[in-house]
Image (cartoon, rainbow, N blue to C red):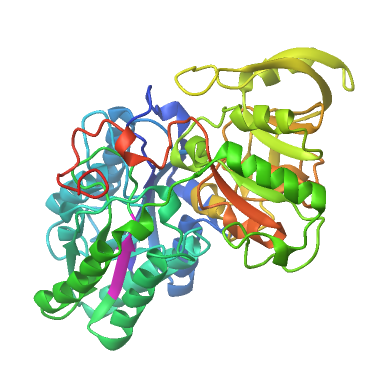
């Protein structure tokens, strides 16, 4: 008989140091059969649905809630999710479930709950009993707790950052749940957490320390057949919780202490090499001088400094130089409205440079401006807590659009968050002297080149592109880049973790303490 599986999703990466709240209105909500609309869109939910069809599951779809990273979530969102989940279970009570599959992030915080996912798992376990397997997929940036691990059996985490494998990891989680439902096996999830936090800039899996940790995890799975999955979580350091930071889990059919011993090896390595993950930005002024030189001299990639070179840059210019700005990282919850790099590019006089800024108010003002007309406009940073505030100047309006586009790369990091249909809200393209500015109405992580091309901007033709991201953009930008610099600007996602007023995180912990 077909296995009966309850399916639901709750996805938010919460930056607790941001002002304001993430409300229900900020979430995309799917209920019941609407969950099937995610099929083939490259998202983790899509991966789960793919295996559900292949295995002939009888899916009981409950609810899927997802929102772009942002401030602390209203309790209403969590309670809606739980009530819909509980209702689906109660409605199904006459016929027993075989398993529960959840698409979660792992770093969600609400007004009353520092561990949303752990709370949901604890409530679920109390409701369905000890013998029903619960699993699914988790983001590599989850701040995973002992509570979540204790109440689950079949979670698989992304193994890549950028998250090109989010859909694949979801498929792996579904296959693992299918195995448990077929065999009746009931593994244990063991959990371990070293006293280490890394900023997002230090969590790319193409670089150390994550590169080695992921390789070590795969080796453990290869050597120990009773260990069904080893998950490496880099954590999300902008969520102030007791469990913020690096953690490891292992799903094992064997003696838990043996799996725990393997995790201790990973934890010891992470502690020993903790400095590798404490990646900080370069001063903007120093980088701009170097960028000006590269643009003027039209260097070939082998002449680009080793610290800035991308592995894929193997042909002469023209190729853009990428200036990544982690402090305004939209994928980390920042508003994406900083104008410090815009000011710097204008001041440096770098021709053919481009920057995207989220400013719905400015886009609204531009709706009545004739195309091709000059206009005096104020754009960017309404909240002056960071940087020098907004930028005012005389711009030329080039185009307007509805801001919708389809991902060029179905494995884009953005697909792990939103699927392949992206909506930036109404948009406008402006020019100011040497700079092209894309204004959006909905903050959109810069993880796909379709963002530019859909607005008539060819990214490969630019000399410099400013990107509001830490690591996740590199999958799509590295292949076209002549050089890549991570630069320091004012913003709420600084890689200097000591600059944040942590209250809840366990102490001592690196890099807050030595």
Residue at 81 percent of width and 32 percent of height: 434
Residue 108 relative to residue 191: left or right: right
Residue 478 relative to residue 248: left or right: right
Which quadrant of the structure image shows residue 436? top right
Q: Which residue is at the front of the view, 452 or 253?
A: 452
Q: Which residue is at the front of the view, 401 or 483?
A: 483
Vertical side of 479 occupied by 115: above or below: above
Residue at 60 percent of width and 17 percent of height: 390
Residue 194 image position (x, y, % from top left): 20, 58
Residue at 34 percent of width and 70 percent of height: 213
Vertical side of 514 occupied by 21: above or below: above
Which quadrant of the structure image shows residue 113? top left
Chief secondary structure of the magenta span?
strand
Residue 126 image position (x, y, % from top left): 12, 50
Within the magenta stretch, is there residue 231? Answer: yes
Q: Give, as a single range, the part of the protein colored magenta.
A: 229-234
Vertical side of 178 occupied by 29: above or below: above
In the picture as drawn, the residue positioned furthest to the right comes out as 372
Report the number of discs. 0
Vertical side of 500 occupied by 415: above or below: below
Residue 149 image position (x, y, % from top left): 19, 59
Residue 514 image position (x, y, % from top left): 20, 49
Which quadrant of the structure image shows residue 497? top left
Is residue 2 visible in the rendered image? The answer is no
The quarter of the picture where the N terminus appears is: bottom left
Q: Which residue is at the front of the view, 467 or 299?
A: 299
Within the magenta stretch, is there residue 395? Answer: no
Is residue 422 visible in the rendered image? The answer is yes
């Amino acid at each position: 008989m077909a296995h009966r599986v309850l399916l639901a999703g709750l996805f938010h990466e919460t930056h607790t140091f941001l002002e304001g709240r993430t409300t229900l209105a900020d979430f995309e909500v799917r209920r019941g059969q609407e969950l099937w609309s995610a099929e083939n869109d490259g998202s983790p939910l899509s991966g789960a649905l793919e295996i559900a069809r292949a295995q002939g599951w009888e899916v009981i779809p409950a609810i899927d809630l997802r929102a772009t990273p942002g401030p602390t979530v209203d309790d209403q969102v969590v309670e809606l999710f739980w009530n819909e989940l509980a209702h689906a279970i109660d409605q199904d009570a006459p016929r027993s479930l075989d398993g529960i599959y959840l698409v979660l992030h792992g770093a969600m915080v609400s007004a009353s709950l520092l561990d949303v996912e752990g709370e949901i798992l604890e409530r679920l376990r109390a409701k369905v009993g000890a013998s029903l397997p619960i699993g699914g997929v988790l983001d590599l940036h989850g701040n995973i707790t002992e509570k979540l691990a204790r109440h689950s059996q079949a979670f698989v985490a992304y193994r890549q950052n950028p998250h090109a494998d989010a859909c694949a990891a979801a498929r792996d989680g579904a296959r693992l749940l299918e195995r448990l439902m077929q065999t009746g096996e009931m593994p244990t999830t063991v959990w371990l957490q070293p006293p280490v936090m890394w900023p997002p800039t230090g969590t790319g899996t193409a670089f150390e320390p994550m590169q080695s940790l992921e390789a070590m995890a795969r080796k453990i799975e290869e050597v120990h057949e009773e260990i069904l999955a080893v998950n490496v979580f880099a954590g999300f350091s902008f969520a102030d919780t007791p469990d913020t930071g690096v953690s490891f889990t292992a799903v094992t059919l064997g003696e838990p202490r043996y799996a725990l011993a393997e995790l201790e090896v990973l934890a010891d390595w992470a502690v020993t090499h903790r400095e590798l993950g404490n990646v900080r930005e370069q001063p903007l002024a120093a980088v701009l001088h170097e960028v000006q030189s590269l643009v003027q001299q039209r260097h070939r990639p082998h002449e680009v400094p080793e610290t800035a070179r991308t592995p894929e840059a193997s042909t002469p210019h023209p190729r853009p130089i990428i200036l990544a700005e982690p402090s305004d990282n939209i994928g980390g919850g920042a508003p994406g409205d900083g104008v410090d790099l815009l000011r710097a590019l204008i001041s440096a006089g770098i021709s053919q440079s481009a920057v995207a800024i989220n400013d719905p108010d400015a886009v609204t003002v531009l709706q009545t401006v004739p195309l091709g007309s000059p206009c005096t406009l104020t754009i960017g940073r309404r909240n002056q807590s960071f940087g020098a505030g907004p930028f005012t100047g005389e711009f030329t309006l080039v185009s307007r659009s509805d801001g919708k586009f389809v991902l060029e790369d179905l494995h884009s990091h953005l697909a792990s968050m939103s699927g392949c249909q992206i909506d930036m809200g109404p948009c406008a393209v402006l020019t100011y002297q040497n700079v092209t500015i894309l204004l959006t109405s909905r903050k959109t992580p810069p993880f796909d080149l379709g963002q530019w091309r859909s607005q008539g901007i060819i990214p490969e033709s630019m000399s410099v592109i400013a990107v509001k991201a830490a690591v996740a953009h590199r999958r799509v930008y590295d292949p076209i880049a002549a050089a890549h610099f991570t630069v320091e600007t004012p913003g709420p996602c600084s890689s200097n973790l000591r600059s944040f007023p942590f209250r809840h995180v366990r102490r001592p912990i690196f890099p807050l303490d030595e």
